[in-house]
Amino acid sequence: MLDFVEFAQLDAQGARLQEKVDLAQNKNRHAYFIVNQFAAMARAKSAKSKSPLIAVVTASSRDPFESADFYQGLFEQAGANVIWLPLDPAFQQARAMQDLGFAGCEKLAELHSNHGLFDRERIYPLLTALQRNWCQQPEKLQQVLREVQGVFFNGGDQSLTLAAMTKPDGSDSAELAIIRQRFEQGELVVGGTSAGTAVQAGGVFTQRPVPMLSNGQTGIAFSRGPFATAALSTRLWPAAGLWQWPVGW
């Protein structure tokens, strides 16, 4: 309902108003340091030591389009060139449909609605058009990932970011494969905040798998252990009386 009644915020020329960031005014000195340190680490990966190119992924948000301005502005304030990557669960589903010969990229709005996101083409016409274009020409997005020195994931729900970086069958997407390869070769720094950090968990430690904590309740985790399950849809929580995090990991 809120998505459909949202007003587009436009200037006198009809262009969308963008959120502004002033990093220097941040009263949290730790946040200020971390953002600048990430930009510095990315700059160190640049062969010419010029302004680094950082890609931001806002897939952890229910509305990844709404978060794009903030994260772009954040790292621009730290002296980086920034590009927003339109990756989200609907994007990977559309790409899977394309690979099967269907017009999945033309169904992005419908696929977004399956994840509780509606009417974004009206509010963010340029960003949704960019996503559709790169869905139809994924080599453009993949080329960006081959050129950037840093990738940063936002906070929110890490299960959404996981779905944005993997194919519907759970295997690595082409984008994640590039990130893994370049990170392992020391060409790329990867960071995140909150869910953007948690989604990077996993792998194996002392011959045991390390789970990615997604949601759940501490007491149940201690008594039953973590287990893998799909997160409940936020559209179902009120009907189920679950206004807090659902049980599960």
Image (cartoon, rainbow, N blue to C red):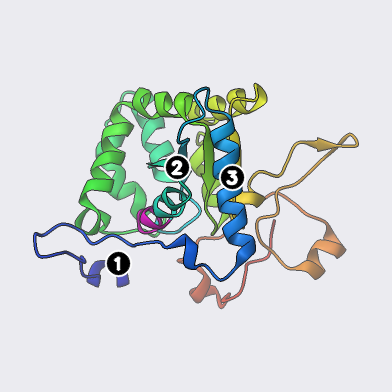
Report the residue at 29% width, 29% height from top: 136
Please provide percent x and percent y for residue 91: 39, 40
Report the residue at 44% width, 59% height from top: 62
Stretch of the chain drawn in magenta: 64-70
Q: Secondary structure at mark 1?
A: helix
Is the stretch drawn in magenta largely helix, strand or loop? helix
> What's the distance in space between the residues labelled 3 and 2, CA to CA?
10 Å
Q: Are marks 2 and 1 in contact (CB under 8 Å)?
A: no
Q: Where is mark 3, residue-wise?
A: 38
Q: Are marks 1 and 3 in contact (CB under 8 Å)?
A: no
Q: Nearer the viewer, residue 69 or 36?
A: 36
Q: Earlier in the sequence, mark 3 or mark 2?
A: 3
Q: Earlier in the sequence, mark 2 or mark 1?
A: 1
Quarter occupied by the C terminus: bottom right
> What's the distance in space between the residues labelled 2 and 1, CA to CA?
32 Å
User: Dot 3: few (<14), some (14–19), or many (≥20) neighbours within 10 Å?
Assistant: many
Report the residue at 66% width, 61% height from top: 215
* Three-letter code for the amino acid on which mark 1 is drawn: Asp
* Three-letter code for the amino acid on which mark 3 is drawn: Phe
Question: In this view, which residue lies farthest toward the left?
Answer: 13
Image position of 199 (left or right of 9): right
User: Dot 1: few (<14), some (14–19), or many (≥20) neighbours within 10 Å?
Assistant: some
Q: Which of the 4 quarters of the picture holds residue 244? A: bottom right
Q: Where is mark 1, residue-wise?
A: 3
Can you say whether 10 is above or below 110 in the image? below
Q: Indicate yes or no whether the magenta region holds residue 23.
A: no
* Three-letter code for the amino acid on which mark 2 is drawn: Ala
Question: Any mark on residue 80, and which?
Answer: 2
Residue 14 in sight in this render: yes
Please provide percent x and percent y for residue 193: 59, 55
Please provide percent x and percent y for residue 189: 60, 35
